[in-house]
Amino acid sequence: MTKENHNSKSMFHGFWALTNRDLKKWYKEPILVFMAIIQPILWMGLFGKAMNIGGIFSSNTFSLTGIPLPAGVDPNDQSVQNLLKFMGSPAFSQQLSPIVMKATFGVTQYFSFLAVGMLSFVVVFTAMFSGMSIVWDRRLGFLNKALSTPVPRGAIVMAKVMNSVIRSLIQAAIVVVLAWLLGIQFSASFSILSLLVAFAALFLMCLGLSSLFLAIAIRSTKWETQMAVVNLLNLPLLFTSNALFPTTLMPSWLKTISEFNPITYGTDAARQMIINSTVTLYGIGPGHLLFDFAYLGGFAIIFATVGIILSIRYLSK
C-alpha cells in the first residue's frame, strides 16, 4: 500500500470514527432523541391542528351576507337575493373553504403545509446546535486529543457536520411518520422516490447550515457565546422562510429576504415532492425543483468549503 493510499484510508477511518463517536453519544441517550422530536410534535399537534384556518370559512363562523353590496346593485332584485341566500348557505362555505386553502397554501388543509415545514424545522435546529459539540470538545479536552492524531483538521470538522446531517435526517423521518399518523395529505404521486428526493434537499440544506454554524463556533471557548448565536438566529431564520407561511403573501421586503434563505428552497423542494403544493416560492403554479437543488447545492458546497478552510487555518488546541 502506498503512503498516499494509507493516508487516505487513515483520513476516512478517522473521519468515520469521530462521526460515530458523536452519534453514539446521541443514540445511547434516548432522552436526547425524544427532546429533539417533541418540539415539532407539539407544533404539528397543537399549532397545526388548533390553527384550523379552513374552519374560518365554515358555515358557523363565516358568512358573506353582511358584506355591503357594490353601488348600483339593487338588493331587492330577486337574482341578487338568491345569490345572497346561496352565499350564506353551508353548501357555499363547504365549496369556498378548499378553494381558498388551495389558492393560499397549495393544499386543502394547513396541517399538511405545516407538517412539511416541520421537516425543515428539525433540520435547522439540529444544524444550529452542531456548533455546540466542538465547543464542549474543546472545554473537555477531547479536541486536543483529536488534533494530536494524523486525522486532518478538515475531517474533524466534517465529522461534526456529518453527525448533524445524519441526526437531522433520522429525526425528519420520524416526523414524517408522525405527520402521517396525524393526517397529512400526501400527494397522489407520492412515493418512496419522492421522499428520497425531498430528503436529498434536506441533506444539502443541513450540510450547508451545519458547516456555517460550526465555522462560527470554531474559535469559541464558551458555550454561552454559541447559545447566544443560536437564540439570535433561530426564529429569524425560520420566520423569514416559507416553513410556516407562504412567501407569496409576505410583504415585499420580507419576501426578498426569504429568497436568500436556504430554508425556503429546502422546504419548497420538500413540499413539491411530498404534498405537491401548487403554491411555491415562485407563485402559484409548477415549481422549479432544479433551481431549488442548484441553490441548495451551491450553498452546501460554499459553506462546507469555508468550514474546512477555517478549520485548517484556525482550529487549534
Image: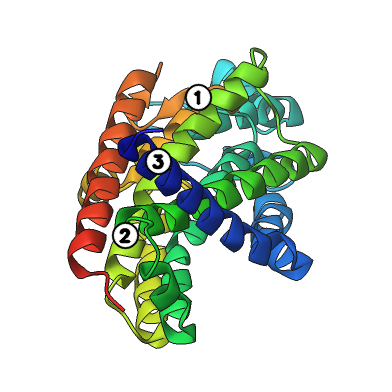
Q: Which residue is mark 2?
A: 153
Toward which corner of the image does residue 128 lie, by quadrant? bottom left
Residue designated by label 3 = 6
Image marks 2 and 1: residues in contact by CB distance under 8 Å: no
Q: Tag 3: residue type?
A: His
* Mark 2 crowd level (few <14, some 14–19, many ≥20, 10 Å Cα): many
| Label of residue 121 in the image | none
Q: Locate residue 317 relative to residue 59 in the image: left or right.
A: left
Q: Is residue 77 above or below residue 145?
A: above
* Local secondary structure at mark 1: helix
Label 2 SS: helix
Placement of the N terminus among the 4 image quadrants: top left
User: What amino acid is found at the position of numbered circle 2 in the picture?
Assistant: Arg
Which amino acid, mark 1? Gln
**Which callout, 1 or 3, points at the residue further toward the start of the chain?**
3
Location of residue 262 with respect to 230 vertically, above or below: above
Residue 249 image position (x, y, % from top left)? 36, 42
Mark 3, other Cα within 10 Å: few <14 / some 14–19 / many ≥20: few
Q: Considering depth in this image, is 1 or 163 the residue closer to the camera?
A: 1
Front in this rendered view, residue 41 or 298: 298
Q: Are marks 1 and 3 in contact (CB under 8 Å)?
A: no
Instruction: Tell me the CA gap for discs 2 and 1.
Output: 38 Å
Identify the mark nearer the N-term, 2 or 1. Answer: 2
Task: Answer whether residue 78 is visible to the viewer in this image.
Answer: yes
Q: Which of the two marks, 2 or 1, is nearer to us in this view?
A: 2
The image shows residue 59 at horizontal and vertical percentages of 73, 39
Numbered label attached to residue 272: 1
**Disc on the earlier residue, 2 or 3:** 3
Q: Label 2 to label 3, Cα distance in Å?
A: 17 Å
* Residue neighbourhood size for the residue with mark 1, other residues' Cα within 10 Å, grouped as few (<14), some (14–19), many (≥20): many
Residue at image coords 24%, 47%: 305
